[in-house]
Amino acid sequence: MTGTFDLDANLFMAVRRAVADDESSRIRLLGVLVEPRESGGAFLVATDGRVMLVGLDQSATATRPTILRLKMPQRELDEWGDEIEFTPWDRSRLHMEIDGQNAPSVAHFHNPSSRGYFHALVEEIEDAKHYPDWRAVMTGKVKVKQVQKPYNDFGINARILSRVQGTEPALHLEQPSEDGAPWRIGFERGDLTGVIMPRLMETMDNLALTTIHQDVKARGDG
């Protein structure tokens, strides 16, 4: 089934930070879910099973739901073959025409103001109906179950937070009211949000929330 997708490239790449590693056997988590809204635009969702990011792209055009896996080049080159020294998706559009033949298609990053563009490969990896119920995760209906003592404390992996922060100037965490429920991740930009599942930790390994927060803001991965 063919499909046309025109998205906010910066938001797509921000959400993409939460996709699973290439070595993951959970194929559907290797890509970004694009889910059109009846009122216009689309939700962009990515998760590796531990953290989930959700973007609301109100400018998006998406003809149908899908899961798209973007394969970036080893080096980012412009149309003349020169290496790009800036983030090519900043203030850009991401346009994709999927032919539905289970073969990679070309993803076009285009910046209307600078008229610059570059290409990557994109493939549709699975039917969108097989994607996890992201609304249940975001609303806290999915929880980490406490299995046995001494694993009776929940901690947050600061390394994961550092990865999902990317080049965002700041993020904040909102602790849930129930043990085992996901912690909400807030960004300064209003079109991006997320949650991170806590992990069971021994008490001696647990870190204070303020320590984790400061560590994430200081390091980043940009």
Image (tube, rainbow, N blue to C red):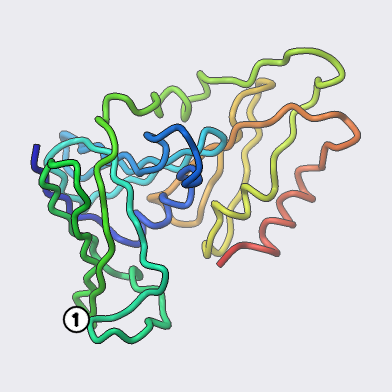
Q: Could you say where residue 184 lies in the image, as x and y percent from the top left?
A: 56, 37
Instruction: Judge by depth and name the residue closer to the eye, 8 or 188.
Output: 8
Q: Could you say where residue 58 lies in the image, as x and y percent from the top left?
A: 24, 49
Above or below: residue 151 compared with residue 168: above
Work out which quarter of the rendered image holds the N terminus and state it. Answer: top left
Above or below: residue 49 compared with residue 220: above
Q: Which residue is mark 1?
A: 115
SS label for mark 1: loop
Mark 1 crowdedness (10 Å alpha carbons): few <14, some 14-19, many ≥20: few
Q: Residue at x 44, y 56 (%)?
A: 189
Q: Residue at x 36, y 43 (%)?
A: 31
Above or below: residue 198 compared with residue 147: below
**216 relative position to 39: left or right:** right
Q: Could you say where residue 62 lies in the image, as x and y percent from the top left?
A: 16, 45
Instruction: Judge by depth and name the residue closer to the eye, 50 or 22.
Output: 22
- Residue farthest to the right, as pictured: 204
Q: Residue at x 41, y 51 (%)?
A: 16
Work out which quarter of the rendered image holds the C terminus and state it. Answer: bottom right
Q: Could you say where residue 218 lies in the image, as x and y percent from the top left?
A: 70, 64
Q: Amino acid at mark 1?
A: Arg
Instruction: Judge by depth and name the residue closer to the eye, 124 or 207.
Output: 124
Q: Residue at x 66, y 20 (%)?
A: 178
Instruction: Judge by depth and name the residue closer to the eye, 148 or 169.
Output: 148
State how many labels appear: 1
**82 relative position to 103: left or right:** right
